[in-house]
Amino acid sequence: MTYTLISVIAVLCYLAAGLILGRQLIKKPAPTTGKKLAPLLLGFFAVGLHAGILLHNLFGVAGINFGFFHAVSLLSWLIALLFLVTALTKPVENLGIAILPLAGIAIILESTIPSDHFLSTGARHLEIHILLSFTAYSMLSIAALQALLLAIQEHHLHNKHPGGFIRALPPLQTMESLLFQMITLGFILQSLSLITGFIYIDDIFAQHLVHKTILSLLAWLVFAILLWGRWRYGWRGRTAIRWTLGGFSALALSYLGSKWVLEILLEK
């Protein structure tokens, strides 16, 4: 099976899984267990194909290619994988309506737009730092999507419009509980990422890293305050949503934003 064919099948599977989840959300009768699992299994199949695509594109003789669109594809794969694993035990399958098609789009971008930025292999400690950073970013990305869905749900309920797809969502309290579980796990992973960065990177405040480091620390601080506010004052609702999206915005700018400027705009 050729690389192009694998890419096409992976994209179609991602899109089909997202479409099925979308139809289940707006459908009035609740889907049976088998129907709930069908799009998730299709998503897992797409994730498996996506992994093969990443192995083909990322690893070469010159090292690991962390070019912008390859990095976006890797992040989208990890987000999709974490979502699917979580959806097996938690009621978060509605997030797949956005996550899975976006992963398909990431494959298209990776396959059609060249982006090369090689990282020499052999630096095992640096690879650990990168893995922790990517995993933390992926988990907090899912938390940000959960916050957006929570915002929509809260808006409809406050305006006394609980109909439509809102009826298919879990109760508000369950949605908030899931949000903070995601944030807590993402915060722990981000903390480990920052610790390994300070330990293993010679000058984490070097000119090409300073903006990334400062924004990452800002995001960490935002999530730390949010978790403290939740524990101390019971923060919830719009307060939790705003802090979550604020922290994620800083985190997105710290990695993808800076990477876009350096590699695409400045071509460094």
Image: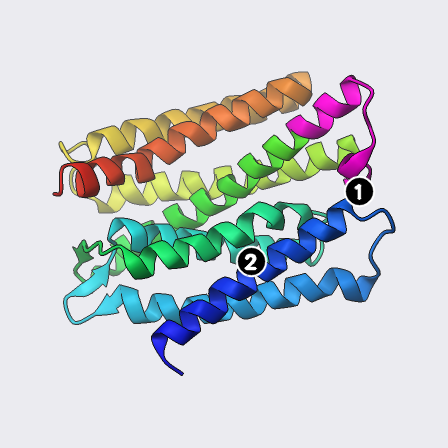
Does the magenta run of residues contain 155? yes
Give residue 15's mark. 2
Q: Main secondary structure of the magenta part?
A: helix
**In this rendering, would 98 be left or right of 204?**
right
Query: Which residue sits at x=67%, y=39%?
Result: 178
**In this rendering, would 81 be left or right of 17?**
left
N-term-proximal mark, 1 vs 2: 2
Residue underneath mark 1: 168
Please provide the residue range marked out in magenta: 151-170
Where is residue 114? Give x, y as percent: 22, 56
**In this rendering, would 38 be left or right of 257?**
right
**Image quadrant where residue 115 sits:** bottom left
**In this rendering, would 247 be left or right of 16?**
left
Q: Secondary structure at mark 1?
A: helix
Where is residue 27? Give x, y as percent: 80, 49
Query: Which residue sits at x=61%, y=48%?
Result: 97
Indicate the amino acid at tag 2: Leu
9 up-or-down from 208: above or below: below
Dot 2 surroundings within 10 Å: few (below 14), some, or many (20 or more)? many
Indicate the amino acid at tag 1: Ala
Q: Is residue 236 visible?
A: no
Considering depth in this image, is 189 or 9 the residue closer to the camera?
9
Which quadrant: the C terminus? top left
Query: Which residue sits at x=77%, y=35%?
Result: 166
Considering depth in this image, is 163 or 267 the residue closer to the camera?
163
- Find out whether the residues at labels 1 and 2 contact each other: C-beta distance under 8 Å: no
Rendered image coloring scheme: rainbow
Residue extending farthest to the bottom is: 1
**Label 1 to label 2: alpha-carbon separation:** 21 Å
